[in-house]
Image: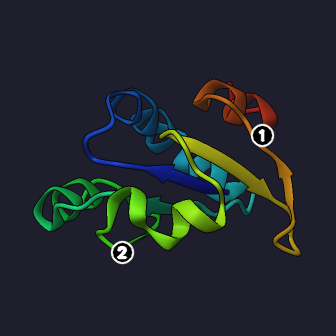
Amino acid sequence: MIVFWSSTCSHCENELPQLLTKYKDLQAKNIQIIGLSLDVDKNAYTTKIAAFPWINDSELRGWNSSFAEIYNIHATPTYFILDANNKIISKPNHVGDVLEYFKLK
C-alpha cells in the first residue's frame, strides 16, 4: 500500500495513527506500507516519520514532488493498494476504507 501524506495535513493527523494501530495486523497479512510525503520542511518530516515504522520517503518539494505528478495526487492522505506485481488494484478514500479492504476494522 502507498499512502501520500504531509505533516501539515489535518486529515493525515487523524488517519495515519489508525494505520499505526493496525500496523502489526497488516504485517501479519504480509502487507507493506510505503509513505510518500509531500512535505517541504525537513524537520517536520523527520519528526513525524519517527512515529511511523513503515518505509517513508520525501523529496521535500511539497506539491512539486515527482510523487504528486506521477500519481496525480491532489489531496492528502491518498491511498493506493497494489497487488504483488505493483499494479494499483484499489484507491480507498479514507483509512476506514483501507482497513475494511484488508478486513481489519
For residue 96, above or below residue 29? above
Residue 64 spot, x, y in % from top left: 40, 64
Residue 25 spot, x, y in % from top left: 63, 46
Look at mark 1 in the image and give the residue it sits on: 102
Using residue 38 as the reference point, say whether residue 97 is left or right of it: right
Count neighbours of disc 1 (C-alpha within 10 A) and say few if under 14, some if 14 to 19, many if 20 or more: some
- Quarter holding the C terminus is top right
**Residue 34 visible to the viewer:** no
Looking at this rendering, what residue extends furthest in the left direction?
Answer: 43
Q: How many marks?
A: 2
Look at mark 2 in the image and give the residue it sits on: 59
- Residue that appears at 65% across and 50% down: 26
- Residue that appears at 64% across and 63% down: 32
Between residue 54 and residue 69, name the one nearer to us: 69
Circle 2: residue type: Glu
Using residue 61 as the reference point, say whether residue 95 is left or right of it: right
For residue 40, above or below residue 105? below
Helix, strand or loop at mark 2: loop
**Closer mark to the observer between disc 2 and disc 1:** 2
Using residue 17 as the reference point, say whether residue 2 is left or right of it: right
Residue 45 spot, x, y in % from top left: 23, 60
- Residue that appears at 40% across and 28% down: 11
Circle 1: residue type: Phe
